[in-house]
Image (spheres, rainbow, N blue to C red):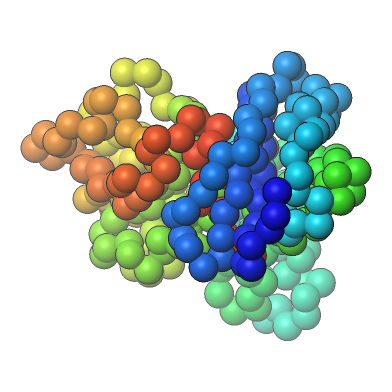
Amino acid sequence: MRRAFGQVVRLGVATGAVSLLAASRWRAGKVLVLAEQPVAGPGGEALGAALRALLGGQDVAGWPLTVVLADELCRLWQVAPPPGAARLPDIEAAAALRFHALYGEGPAAWQVTADWHSTEPFFAAAVPRTLLALIDAVALEHRLHVVQVVPHFVTAWNRWCRAIRPGAWFGQLHDNLLTVAAIEGRQLRAVRALQVPPAADHYWLTQMMGREALLLGLDTPAQVQLCGALPAGLARPAGAGQVGVVRLDTGQGDELSIAGRLAYPGSAP
C-alpha cells in the first residue's frame, strides 16, 4: 500500500486480540482497519504468532508504527518524590519503591517511564520488557519503525485531561476494564484498574468510586468523564445521589470492534 504523507500505522495489543489500523497525523479520526487477529492463548508465543499473522501480507514496510497496549498489560501508578530530591536516581528509586509497595515485586522486569518531577507527584507507567522485546522483534521482521509504545489509558489521558471538569474523575473503559484517574483539584492522585461486571450501573459505579475515594482520603467525585463504549446500565441517566457518567469520545470509533477501538485513539507520533 502506498503511504501518503503523514500516514502511520497503529498496532493495538491486548491479551485476546491484536489489531492494525492505518491513520494520518493530519486527519484525526480518519482510520482504516487493515487487519484484526485473535490471540490463541496466553503467553508470548501465542501473542507473537498473532502479531506475525496480523502483519503477514500487509504492505506497510517502512511505515512508522505506534503501539497501543491494553491497560491490563501495563502497570500505572502515581509517585510522590522524596523530600529534598534533586537527582534523577533519587526520583527513580522512589518510583521503584512505590512499584514494589503496590505490586509486591521490583521493577527489574519492567520498562518504567514517567513524567519525572523532583517536587511534585508524577505519573509513572511500566511495560514488561519481554513484551517490548517481542514487539520490537516482530516490527523488525516486517521492516516497521516503532516510534511509540504507550498504554491505552495514557493515550486517552493525554488527549482529554484538559477537558476534565472540577470535581470529576477521569476513566478509560475498554473490554470490561475501567482504568480510573482519581483527581484532586487539577492533580492526579492515583490510578486504579477496576473490572466492570456485565450488569454494571450507576449504583455499582457509585460504590466503587466511594470506596476508592475513602481509601485516598478524597471526596467522592460528582461524575466520571470517560472514554469508551458504555454498558447499558451506565448509558442511562444516574439516579439521585449517584455518580454520573459523561462520555468524552462519543461517536469516535464506535463502529469499530473492541480490538479496533484499542488502536483507534493512538497518540500523536
Query: Which residue is the extreme one toward the front?
Result: 2
Considering depth in this image, is 249 or 209 the residue closer to the camera? 249
Task: Name the quadrant containing residue 255.
Answer: top left
Q: Position of residue 113 (x, y in %)?
A: 71, 61
Residue 236 image offset from top left, x and y in percent: 17, 31
Which residue lies at the image location 63% right of the left edge and 30% below the top edge?
36
74 in relation to 188, above or below? above
In the image, 124: left or right of 220?
right
Q: Position of residue 144 (x, y in %)?
A: 81, 52
Left or right position of 252 against 63: left
Q: How many marks?
A: 0
Front residue (pair 51, 211): 51
Q: Is residue 66 visible?
A: no
The residue sitting at 21% across, 43% down in the picture is 244
Q: Is residue 85 positioned above or below 143 on the image?
A: below
Which corner quadrant of the image does residue 268 belong to?
bottom right
Quarter placement of the C terminus: bottom right
Q: Give whichever of 21, 184 is nearer the camera.
A: 21
* Residue 231 image-quadrant placement: top left
Residue at image point 56% right, 39% down: 33
Of residues 72 and 79, the one drawn nearer to the viewer in this rendering: 72
User: Does residue 18 appear left or right of residue 172 in this picture?
Assistant: right
Residue 266 in view (yes/no): yes
Task: Give the left or right position of residue 127, taking residue 186 as reference.
Answer: right
Where residue 54 appears, as percent x and y from the top left, is 73, 32
Q: Considering only vertical position in the picture, is 38 above or below 145?
A: above
The residue positioned farthest toward the left in the image shown: 240
